[in-house]
Image (tube, helix red, strand yellow):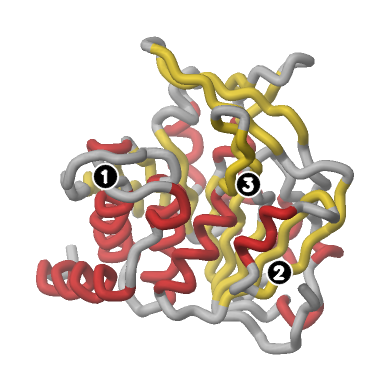
Amino acid sequence: MPTGSAVPDVLVIGHIVADVQDGQRILGGTPAYAAHVARAFGAQTRLLTSAAADEPLLQELNFVETHCLAAEHTTTMENHYSAAGRRQVMRQVARPIDASAVPAAWRDARYVMLACMAGEIDPTIVDGFPQAKILLTAQGYFRSWDERGWVRPQPWFDETLLQAVDVVVFSEEDIRDLPGGLAQIVAVSRNVVLTRGKEGGTLYREGRTQPYGTLHLGECELTGAGDVFAACLLCALRGGLSVWQATQLAGRLAGISVTREGMASAPRPAEISEQWGIVLGSGED
């Protein structure tokens, strides 16, 4: 889709993902979920991604203005579940994304989400958004994979990038095998959110540790809940909530998200309004 001239409220950057499930390719990846979430919040949104030039999954994002760097492949992942947990396989990876890929009209975006899926985002891209509020989902920097594509955790720490963003979000699973990584990241970051799925998570800010909860409405599909959480947090900041209020709202909306599957897990405007009122009513901490 051609890029327009309007300055976006929210700019999402990162690879969309083709999730392979039972032999079928399904749209996934944090950027795709974030686009749906931002639409529900009423934000004027743009998406910068990379995928195969003829990728049919992009048609599911035709509601958002997209600049796609044509690649040989779309980033493609398989998830294998067992009693031991989830194992991921990276089948293919699209092109890297750096500052030169950002359309000129989008460089004044007010809120930017760096949604890294496969280490694809050049960390120096943040230099192009000196006035923006930036949220980083770091899961893609914590991933490496072997010649067979089996994904394994890797240590990651980029002090310059962490100091440049306003909020960094990652899951307990992302750093499960990386002892000491959390403390190092918290020490140099403004706001860190560690998500723990159905247990909620923790916001680390200004030397404080603040646990937040989520709603328990029954589970349908946990995939994408963390993506919904991060996008809701950024959109709540855009709406004027504090970081703590935004974290609480995102946790509640992520709890709702697991009752639906796929991109339908994005919150609905009525759900946002209801939970927004509850969070405001609880006061600031």
Residue type for callout 1: Thr
Residue displayed at 32% across by 74% down = 269
- Distance (Cα) linking label 1 and label 3: 25 Å
Residue type for callout 2: Thr
Which residue is tagged 2?
Answer: 66
> Tag 3's secondary structure?
loop
Rendered view: 171 above or below 249: above
Which residue is tagged 1?
Answer: 209
Hey, which quadrant is residue 233 in on the image? Answer: bottom left
Residue displayed at 68% across by 50% down = 15
Residue 114: x %, y % from top left: 61, 56
Q: Residue furthest bottom?
A: 6
Numbered label attached to residue 121: none
Which residue is tagged 3?
Answer: 116
Residue 274: x %, y % from top left: 19, 72
Quadrant, the N terminus: bottom right
Residue displayed at 48% across by 70% down = 38
